[in-house]
Image (spheres, rainbow, N blue to C red):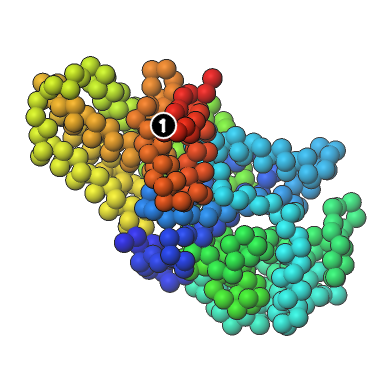
Amino acid sequence: MIKIYNTLTRKKENFTEQEKGVVKFYCCGPTVYNCIHMGNARPICVCDVIRKYLEHKGFRVIYVQNFTDIDDKIISIANEAGTDYLTISRKYIAEYKKDARGLNVREATVHPLATENIDYMLKMISGLIDKGYAYRSVSGDVYFDVAKFKDYGKLSGQSIKDLESGARVEIDGSKRNPLDFVLWKKAKVGEPFWSSPFGDGRPGWHIECSAMIYRYLGDTVDIHFGGQDLIFPHHENEIAQSECFNGKALANYWMHNGYINVNNQKMSKSLNNFFTVREISEKYGYDVIRFFMLSSHYRSPLNYSEEVLEQCKRSLERLRTCRGNLDFLRDRSSGQKSLEAKELLNGLLEYREEFFKAMDDDFNTADAISALFNLTKKINVVVADERQVSLGFINEAIRIFDELCGILGIAFASKTGKVSKGYVEGLIQKREKARNEKNWELADALRDELKNIGVKLEDTAEGVRWSFLD
């Protein structure tokens, strides 16, 4: 049974999906005005592992991650560059996807753009006005009336009174309450705008995610994920507007990752203490960054330093050495070596169970990685004496090793620079299983994953043939 720490209830809960076998999963994506920094990379790496693990457990995951492609910062950068917001946003969406591929993060089921969902935002805003939860101000903007939603503050665990006294809010005489947030911004001279029943303008940030969830996943998602900094006000506001619009819970499980810190400060663009994924990857490689993101439990803070990245690099080398030794022994084996040594095979399964126990406990990748290294240590001890290693042990070790690394998204290159044959065949087996179960969405996703790591598939009457892309 998978347990998830729910930010809303502040406790771990047994995970139960709404629709049997299907998980509706939403993650707040980036505002695309620059290359992503290390803090942005953490949620996408964590969500990718959660998605892989749920699929490994047999769920069909509908994963939606948005792009905010209209925003004050995007407009400002476009103006500075003498271009338009579309040019800037499309450029950095492409840069994001390049980094995501490098991090071995699979594309979402849907990557919606805010600007492609204006009609759904207008529908929600109109509905909120009609129900009395939103109002048109004298300034021409449309605001959500926080006082009308009695549960406001339930995600952050604060009352409206506490939030009013502690929140940093701009003084705006057109608001009824300082906490009221904008749903629709009146058009300004020189800025892009859309026509609406409330006048020309563009959407506020918070309504974007609610509208995209409504369109692509329905009223309620199983899991809503984001950074800890989004709890208030972004996710609090999402809850208010969505639940007032449709009368249903927005999400059953709220998950938030901890900060990445530099010198005990949160890494962020606003503090100008950030490092982009691109620049760090040029020195250490994307695989080291991904391993770093998973080296602590997702809710814990991560402390960034070059020393930590060096440790992650050495850890990956240990895993690669173990995997390479197994390939070497299998290539040399005649299949006539010693008995299977059942107790040795059971030892491998013990560490597999340890890995799954960690992942079932709120996707604890830190403990899962510890289990993987315990498995590695066990393998290394056994293969130290080639005379006692059977082909059965080697094949089972490769199968389990690749299975666990596959869930974590750790791919290993062979001497030819391609991922290992065992890793490829493991993904192909999972795809065939999905096809036999008519789980076409998962089968297509696995085909895409194989393509992303340079593998070409050919479905024939005799079975699947595969080769590495040129």
- Residue 191 placement, left or right of 366: right
Q: Residue furthest right?
A: 189
Which secondary structure, mark 1? loop
Local packing at callout 1 (Cα closer than 10 Å; few below 14, some 14-19, many 20+) is few
- How many badges with numbers are in the image? 1
Q: Is 434 placed above or below 171 here? A: above
Quadrant (top left, top right, bottom left, bottom right) of the C terminus? top right
Residue found at x 78% / y 71% = 142
- Residue 431 placement, left or right of 242: left
Quadrant (top left, top right, bottom left, bottom right) of the N terminus? bottom left
In this view of the protein, can residue 46 be seen by the observer? Answer: no
Residue 21 at what x, y percent from top left?
43, 60
Q: Is 315 placed above or below 324 here? A: below
Residue found at x 62% / y 49% = 111
Q: Is 89 placed above or below 65 here? A: above
Please name whichever residue, 293 or 467, is drawn nearer the observer in this view of the structure. 467
Please name whichever residue, 83 or 19, is drawn nearer the observer in this view of the structure. 19
**Amino acid residing under circle 1:** Glu
Please name whichever residue, 423 or 9, is drawn nearer the observer in this view of the structure. 423
Q: Which residue is mark 1?
A: 462
In this view of the protein, can residue 320 be seen by the observer? Answer: yes
Residue 148 at what x, y percent from top left?
66, 82
Residue 95 at what x, y percent from top left?
64, 36
Residue found at x 51% / y 60% = 24
Residue 464 at what x, y percent from top left?
43, 32
- Residue 390 placement, left or right of 95: left
Please name whichever residue, 84 or 423, is drawn nearer the observer in this view of the structure. 423
Residue found at x 73% / y 65% = 121
